[in-house]
Image: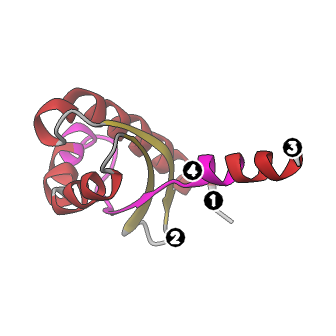
């Protein structure tokens, strides 16, 4: 159960990450369309689990690119939120497969 502070920080991080992925997708991520679907912050605010939806052919390769640039992403976000947060959590990026799960359930219901 997340408390109110975790929810507020997750919301701020989600918005800033979404803007970053939209703005820097062409230069940092080879033009991939990346959407931030959810952000969960741990209780001690040291880690943030970020779920991404990646449109493209090589989503695993793009995820690896995002993971290798996580320090750079964290630095950019830290500069943006320096007046709102004292410490920016480390990011852990995952592919959001909820759309695939939804399609699988929908296919099973059609049968």
- Taking depth in this image into account, of 14 and 110 the one nearest to the observer is 110
The answer to if 100 sits in the magenta stretch is yes
Which label sits on residue 28? none
Residue 44 location in percent, x, y? 45, 72
Outermost residue to the front: 111
Asked if disc 1 and disc 4 are in contact, CB closer than 8 Å, the reply is yes
Return the residue at label 2. Answer: 43
- Taking depth in this image into account, of 18 and 77 the one nearest to the observer is 18
Which residue corresponds to the image point at 41% horizontal and 35% vertical from the top-left? 15
- Give whichever of discs 1 and 2 has the lower sequence position: 1
The answer to if 42 sits in the magenta stretch is no
Q: CA distance from mark 1 to mark 2?
A: 8 Å
Return the residue at label 4. Answer: 7
Which label sits on residue 110? 3
Q: Secondary structure at mark 1?
A: loop
Name the quarter where the N terminus is drawn. bottom right
Q: How is the image coloured?
A: secondary structure
Asked if disc 4 and disc 3 are in contact, CB closer than 8 Å, the reply is no
Q: Secondary structure at mark 4?
A: helix
Asked if disc 1 and disc 2 are in contact, CB closer than 8 Å, the reply is yes
Q: Secondary structure at mark 3?
A: helix
Which label sits on residue 3? 1
Range shown magenta: 77-102
Q: CA distance from mark 4 to mark 3?
A: 37 Å
Asked if disc 4 and disc 2 are in contact, CB closer than 8 Å, the reply is no
Q: CA distance from mark 4 to mark 2?
A: 10 Å
């Amino acid at each position: 159960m997340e408390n109110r502070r975790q929810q507020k920080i997750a919301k701020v991080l989600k918005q800033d990450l979404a803007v970053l992925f939209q703005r820097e997708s062409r230069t940092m991520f080879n033009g991939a369309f990346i959407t931030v679907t959810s952000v969960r912050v741990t209780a001690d605010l040291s880690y943030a689990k970020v779920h991404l939806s990646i449109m493209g052919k090589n989503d695993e390769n793009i995820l690896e690119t995002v993971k290798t640039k996580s320090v750079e992403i964290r630095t950019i976000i830290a500069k943006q939120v320096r007046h709102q947060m004292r410490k920016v959590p480390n990011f852990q990026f995952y592919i959001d497969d909820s759309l695939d799960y939804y399609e699988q359930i929908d296919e099973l219901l059609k049968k």
